[in-house]
Amino acid sequence: MCGIVGFFGPDDVVHDIVFGLTALQHRGQDAAGIATFDTNFHLHKGQGLIPDAFKPKHLKKLTGNIGIGHVRYTTQGSNEIDLAQPFTTSYPFGLAMVHNGNVINFRQVATRLHDKYHVLPKTSNDLELIMYTFASELRIKDLDHLSVVDIFDAVETTQELVKGAYATITMIAGHGLLAFNDPLGIRPLVLGRRDTPAGPIYAFASESTCFDYLGFEFIKNIGPGQAVFIDKNFEVHYKNKYAAPKNFCVFEYIYFAREDSTIHGRLVARERVRLGKLLARKVIDAGIRPDMVIDVPSSGYFAASGLAEAMGVPYRRGLVKNNHMGRSFIVSSQAGREDIVKKKLNPIRAFVEGKKIAVVDDSIVRGTTSRRIVSILREAGAAEVYFISSAPPIVSPCIYGIDMAMSTELIAANYTEDEICQFIGADRVIYQDLSDLEELFAEDKGHGGGCFACFSGKYPTGDVSKYLRHVQEERLSQRHEKKRDKIPSVSPKAPAPTEH
Ligand code: SF4
């Protein structure tokens, strides 16, 4: 999971990019990068949160009325700054690209790039495969008279060749700003516009919450296989070759996206309340009558409030979060995750002591965070603790850009509900039913369904068993601190942005 933005307007865009990325900080906290273009590319990347990665001296040099930005959460490879985005190339002319997602047929794509165009990416970041595939397809066009049709043709071929999940934004030097999605539309991407006295400014972003902050009007979601190009005269061109039903990631609604974002017409906060209400029936059927519903802050809040409302039980904030710690889900090591849970959650003893508590979290991944939360509540004197998961059991790893865990680490893939309950030390564990979740999103008739693969094991891109084996082996090898098997490095033409 990463966050991406792109802006194109009459004046410098760097401050819009910084504010946009700050609104998407929940999508990645490992590193951040911005590329802008005036007559040259200007690029800066830094580790950590936006205020750490960008100082005024960097922003001053990121000039230009077109630019893209990225916040990184490491799913592939190490946390080296070289792997942070944007990536730039001068092949066949100036391009800079960011993406959110994961390519699952990287070996085929890399082999084709090599055999057909003698191009090989320099790093293990799969963005390079998308960028060089797109660039190679552009290179065979008439570059002196590059048209919108040429650009969309290159997008279409890229979408046919590159499998997986990817929402991308590309600056094409001297031509405009392009965004396109994978054919299944797994990851989110939206288009917005703000009018200024000097003319319109267009923006692409992972989530609509950026637009609220920046006073942009929401225009549309970029759907499955769609491409949108803003040309140098600020004309907007749309292309939608794939009218396939979308397979949008339902986990965005459960956990990843910010609650104030609207994705495909659904407000994330409202969907979380509905998930909580759906859980009420299961909790009642299980004979559970809590004195109080609390949430695991902050992604459990809306589901907890929905559950409490549907059950007629008081909701209280029973755990207080230190907001200056990172999200435990996106901290790479287990030790790091457990340490953060311990430090960031403090129980309100006066509320939980002697009470039967239903604690709602977005999901249970490895079970170790849930166990720690149950233990915190017991230490604060809770009489009983029922652990309620807004998501169904996670039984398969995500291969579309979310680094959840390997199958062997997913507790629901290896243990029964009773065993999980015992492991986390709760009195009961209640999961969302997958069928309820599917039904909730099946209502979305006009837009198709969603990707439920981590709950069902059915991957929308077809048979991925080979890829899953590869991921498992790679992660095991990373664990053993072996060097990752990098794609051989012969770069086409070295990218030559100005580094700040
Ligand atoms: S596998 Fe799960 S997390 Fe990954 S895209 Fe599908 S629903 Fe989202």
Image (tube, rainbow, N blue to C red):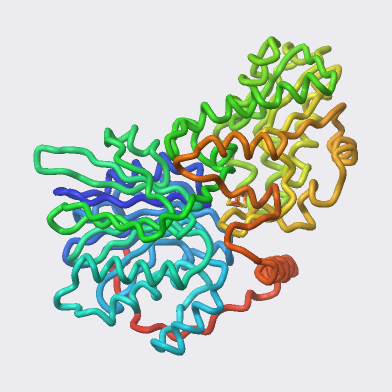
Left or right placement of residue 166 versus residue 326 in this view: left
Can residue 221 be seen at all in this image of the molecule?
yes
Looking at the picture, tell me which residue is in the foreground, 442 or 484: 442
- Is 86 rendered above or below residue 154? above
Q: Position of residue 365 (x, y in %)?
A: 72, 45
Q: Position of residue 380 (x, y in %)?
A: 79, 20
Looking at the picture, tell me which residue is in the foreground, 286 or 88: 286
Q: Residue at x 72, y 46 (%)?
A: 394
Q: Quadrant of residue 91?
A: bottom left
Q: Position of residue 120 (x, y in %)?
A: 45, 82
Q: Residue at x 36, y 50 (%)?
A: 5
Check the picture and name the quadrant holding the C terminus.
bottom left
- Is 282 rendered above or below residue 444? above
Q: Position of residue 490 (x, y in %)?
A: 45, 86
- Is 403 rendered above or below residue 373? below
Looking at the picture, tell me which residue is in the foreground, 197 or 330: 197
Left or right placement of residue 379 versus residue 182 in this view: right
Q: Quadrant of residue 275?
A: top right
Q: Residue at x 77, y 29 (%)?
A: 387
